[in-house]
């Protein structure tokens, strides 16, 4: 996947489409690897699922509704209108401000992460349309470096927020993260403040921000931009929290409830507005965006009275 | 000062110094009977002084961490009562909890009136439990937020003292949405139109520290530390070992000097030799001078300027290509 | 409509009517065998109709209370789903609780988009427990407040449906500062710059009702009640007797008509004969028309005008010399 | 005390002062009534206290710090600088909007209340100075109709708030109330909204409001203006809450903690900023007012820089 770094996102989608078509044409006996690629077992109900069916169902188990993790590219495909996604800051990459080394150098770990995920960083950001509505969309990818937030994730989310503000577009961020990226030390921590500060200006502008929490979202991401949405939506079964389950168990020395930190638990405890199934997510976003859209100018002009702007929108 | 200053308890890396001091003390007792030992004592004193200098000028990151966590280190209440003996404490989030880990105050320092908040670790065991060892619950952050809004309403500058291992990782803390409490503080503190000065006085632990750290000027005491995760947490995740705390301290660049070099803070405040716990008064005085100087500068800005100054500062943080 | 409409359960004061209806039913069954009974049945029907008319046109305050509390009375969720089958429910206070007694929603009624909140009593036992019998905890009011702020931010008008015996008088409710939750709502709702329309659909119980009732226009369904204390509470305090509930109802002037006369509300919405539970659709339709008409008028005002209109309205309430 | 109704507040203070002087001159053997007037037993520690000493100690038991209830007139004397209190709306009285009758007519109960308390209504409001600072001060009196809030209490508190706003004075309200006045029905309830609405405008003006909660404060008063202070101060031992203890015990069918709804319990649960002893109350108020006073003009002019108003006050 080395060449992927030189490819832009649209090429990637195109080539994947091509690969899909080729797969459908060639019918030959399967190798074990191919068999494994074609079938996937549900983590929850253990059902054996045909990979293509699973994809068609947006990576949701049709039997038990288990929501598989979704990468940033697939997520964009699921949410953005076809061909509408225009990526921002595609080339931005981490540097190594601390020349960090644990059992391996940070730069080496970055390369590994890219090889594994096919992505340059743990978030993809861009402008797109959702059911025809313009929107600024950021999607995190847990598959890249555990979705951890370093300088690049912070900067890209901040720039996306600024881009949305500039265009008076709604902002939508799909989070999935293990937390801050330790390898960038204090600079990672500061990304929490940087993104939140940008969101303060965005909130003051009166534009709409919808945060979507997906399996898993923890630490510095939850404790900053992910919890600051005008609406906060969680995917079914997603685990979301500040501290990890094990850390808490070690601290309080008692067992936690089985559903602790699940989306449903959060809903019960008032943290999120709603839990929405993945196959309803796009239409829900579209509905919320439409609901909060200022009335078009023509409607305002149609008003009989010459009084200034109405306090409400019809 | 509210707390009685006791003889400083030596840290592990200070053991050679402590042994030398003990020997000197023993020698001193024999001095009246054996005046010829005077020369030995003088030599020992020289040795002690040079060891002390070399020890404190070559501190490893983990040594700074030990000083930052020293049980006798001055805490938020010590600073408040040194600076303004008549300081007024403000309690509660108005919604069910008064979190002992977060102290709220009205302070007047050198004629500057301000709203102050600070994490508090607690000195006695009972006190520590009341303060939850300096780890705030969501309600502690919401108490701070209430006071930030109060400050903003009445055009009073804000001072935040940071000394916390981090936000409390507990069951009810999660249930009451620790993430949201921190996130909201980050957002709201970014937006206030009064000057905000923060000082890390001991441990600056992760998001729990940052939640009262979105300031126009950030100061750190010389031996304090500030990090994205506790070094213990970092060691256990990256090295999968509890023995690598020193390595984690080193790798994360968490000392005041290193963080100044990274451009995240504005000033390192010197401490008395060996650390603030050797001399509360001097530590408090040094910190006070810096706070007053920074506040005085910031008070010259308009509300819009002071907010922009803060947001611009945080906008710049990050390293990428 | 989410709830299946069942045959209305007769109230105590409706017993004569119920008995007559039973007799008529019995008679009807005999009719095929005894056609000569037709005349009797017709007379009974006349008798029934006139009794019904006289009964419902001479309701005592306590009868209105009984209708307002009827277990089959349409609740907030019934209205929401009748008016906008695709309504979006919004949960939670973001701080630890999603109070089932307070429902939050985005609604679109006749093309008017609005944020709606309403107390919910619950239909089944399990449901009732989830809704705490319509008595919100402080967190329920804080959920409403969060949505009021949302509405204000996005210039969406606010609709509040009131049907609650009152705020919950419990241990944790007090601990979590029920008073503050109500007081803050009164203050913040007074200050929003979007239109607010409130409708008492059943019981308007004291401060717990008012906390979502500071509106530009206040409507009451014909048989709903609104009072400063429950009549039971009033009777036990003033008469020191549980038998004097009817007297208390009478003395407090708590029916829609009386409160209209006192100038506190703007409009009484007629209900189907016998009460809203006899015909959800008609009740919902009547209420909807009034809400839409009031909202439409209010939407012509500027944000400043709409706030002033609301504050002026409440400024006038009171009677003194 | 019938003639009191015709007296204004300053006359009352003057005549009381005279009475005090007379008492000190005449020394004769005491009757039982006189004895009872001279001595009072502490409700908490049972100590027998010399009434004059108790008064000198602001009605706080010198032995156990029990805070006796204080009427509105005494409270004003304790808080306002001598002779500075200028009463507002002294003549305002309840009407009887519902022609309310329980076992007795409301109008009759009003007369009884006035006979008992010597006051026209359950709150006295006015402008005064506190340690030299101008302030708008309202003091409720539990001794009048259980400190209940009807139209007059609501109107007087609202007008006081408006007067404070007009003068940019701090507003101080000392509450003591059993709740809303049932005899005025829904109009009593509306006073909660009326006072809170006035306080919203006051809050927007950036002026300081300090609420003082004293034994006892409940119901509609707690759930409106009493809980809306920029600072909320409670007196030691005062019982404060929304619902009464008995109502709660009946509802939840369990015993409540002994200190439930006390000032100290509220402090522990974060409802109030501080619990302040009565003999520190005036100085605390003065300190808070001074702290929140905008810097005098001269200080601002002394500034070297020509930049607009500073973000903070020195
Ligand atoms: Zn499955
Ligand atoms: Zn006593």
Image (cartoon, coloured by chain):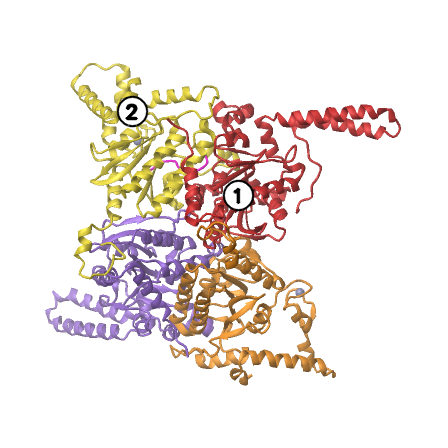
Chain colours: A yellow, B red, C purple, D orange
Helix, strand or loop status at disc 2: strand
Marker disc for residue B294: 1
Residue A265 falls inside the magenta stretch: no
Q: How many numbered marks appear?
A: 2
Helix, strand or loop status at disc 1: helix
How dense is the environment of label 2, judged by Cα within 10 Å: few (below 14), some, or many (20 and up)? some
Q: Quadrant of ligand 1?
A: top left
The location of residue B290, given as percent across then percent down, is: 56, 41
Query: Splitting the image into 4 quarters, where does residue A39 fall?
Result: top left
The location of residue C174, given as percent across then percent down, is: 48, 57
Q: Judge by depth and name the residue closer to the eye, B291 or D196.
A: B291
Q: Judge by depth and name the residue closer to the eye, A177 or D92.
A: D92
Q: Residue at x 44, y 65 (%)?
A: D165
CA gap, disc 1 and disc 2: 60 Å
Q: Are marks 1 and 2 on the same chain?
A: no
Which stretch appears magenta? A236-243
Q: Where is the C terminus of chain B found, in terms of image quarters?
A: top left
Eyeballing the image, is D105 above or below D84?
below
Q: Chain of mark 1?
A: B
- Determine if residue B71 is in view: no
Q: Chain of mark 2?
A: A
Eyeballing the image, is A106 above or below D172?
above
Marker disc for residue D135: none
* Residue reaching furthest to the right: B33
| Mark 1 lies within 8 Å of ligand 2 (Cβ measured) | no
Label 1 or label 2, whichever lies nearer to me, is 1
The location of residue C81, given as percent across then percent down, is: 25, 53
Eyeballing the image, is C132 above or below B75?
below
């Amino acid at each position: 996947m080395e060449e992927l770094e030189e490819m832009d996102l649209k090429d990637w989608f195109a080539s994947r489409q091509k690969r899909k078509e080729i797969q459908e044409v060639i019918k030959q006996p399967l190798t074990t690897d191919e068999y494994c690629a074609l079938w996937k077992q549900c983590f929850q109900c253990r059902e054996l699922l045909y990979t293509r069916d699973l994809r068609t169902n947006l990576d949701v188990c049709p039997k038990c509704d288990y929501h598989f993790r979704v990468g940033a590219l697939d997520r964009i495909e699921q949410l953005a209108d076809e061909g509408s996604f225009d990526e921002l800051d595609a080339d931005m990459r981490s540097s190594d401000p601390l020349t960090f080394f644990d059992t391996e150098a940070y730069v080496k770990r970055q390369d590994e992460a890219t090889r594994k995920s096919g992505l340059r960083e743990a978030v993809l950001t861009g402008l797109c349309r959702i059911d025809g509505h313009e929107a600024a969309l950021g999607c995190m990818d847990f598959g890249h470096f555990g979705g951890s937030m370093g300088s690049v994730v912070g900067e890209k989310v901040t720039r996306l927020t600024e881009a949305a503000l500039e265009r008076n577009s709604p902002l939508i961020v799909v989070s999935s993260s293990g937390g801050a990226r330790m390898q960038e030390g204090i600079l990672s921590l500061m990304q929490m403040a940087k993104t939140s500060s940008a969101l303060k200006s965005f909130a003051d502008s009166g534009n709409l921000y919808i945060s979507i929490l997906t399996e898993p979202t923890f630490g510095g991401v939850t404790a900053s931009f992910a919890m600051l949405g005008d609406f906060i939506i969680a995917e079914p079964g997603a685990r979301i929290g500040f501290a990890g389950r094990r850390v808490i168990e070690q601290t309080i020395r008692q067992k936690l409830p089985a559903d602790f930190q699940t989306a449903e638990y959060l809903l019960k405890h008032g943290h999120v507005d709603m839990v929405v199934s993945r196959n309803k997510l796009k239409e829900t976003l579209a509905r919320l965006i439409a609901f909060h859209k200022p009335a078009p100018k023509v409607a305002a002009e149609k008003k009989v009275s010459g009084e200034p702007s109405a306090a409400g929108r019809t | 000062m509210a707390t009685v200053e006791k003889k400083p308890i030596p840290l592990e890396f200070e053991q050679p110094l402590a042994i030398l001091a003990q020997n000197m003390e023993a020698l001193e007792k024999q001095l009246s009977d054996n005046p010829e030992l005077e020369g030995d004592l003088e030599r020992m004193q020289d040795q002690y002084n040079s060891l002390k200098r070399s020890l404190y000028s070559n501190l490893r990151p983990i040594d700074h961490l030990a000083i930052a966590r020293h049980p006798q280190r001055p805490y938020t209440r010590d600073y408040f009562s040194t600076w303004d003996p008549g300081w007024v404490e403000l309690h509660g989030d108005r919604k069910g909890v008064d979190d002992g880990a977060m102290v709220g105050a009205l302070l007047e320092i050198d004629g500057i009136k301000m709203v102050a908040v600070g994490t508090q670790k607690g000195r006695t065991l009972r006190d520590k439990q009341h303060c939850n060892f300096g780890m705030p619950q969501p309600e502690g952050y919401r108490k701070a937020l209430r006071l930030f809004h109060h400050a903003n309403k009445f055009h009073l500058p804000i001072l935040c003292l940071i000394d916390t291992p981090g936000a409390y990782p507990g069951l009810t803390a999660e249930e009451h949405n620790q993430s949201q409490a921190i996130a909201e503080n980050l957002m709201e503190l970014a937006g206030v139109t009064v000057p905000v000065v923060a000082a890390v006085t001991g441990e600056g632990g992760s998001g729990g520290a940052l939640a009262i750290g979105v300031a126009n000027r950030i100061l750190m005491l010389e031996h304090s530390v500030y990090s994205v995760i506790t070094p213990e947490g970092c060691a256990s995740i990256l090295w999968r070992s509890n023995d690598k705390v020193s390595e984690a301290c080193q790798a994360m660049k968490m000392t005041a000097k290193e963080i100044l070099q990274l451009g995240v803070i504005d000033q390192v405040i010197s401490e008395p030799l060996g650390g603030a716990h050797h001399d509360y008064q001097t530590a408090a005085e040094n910190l006070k001078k810096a706070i007053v100087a920074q506040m005085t500068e910031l008070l010259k800005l308009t509300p819009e300027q002071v907010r922009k100054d803060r947001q611009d500062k945080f906008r710049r943080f990050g390293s990428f290509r």
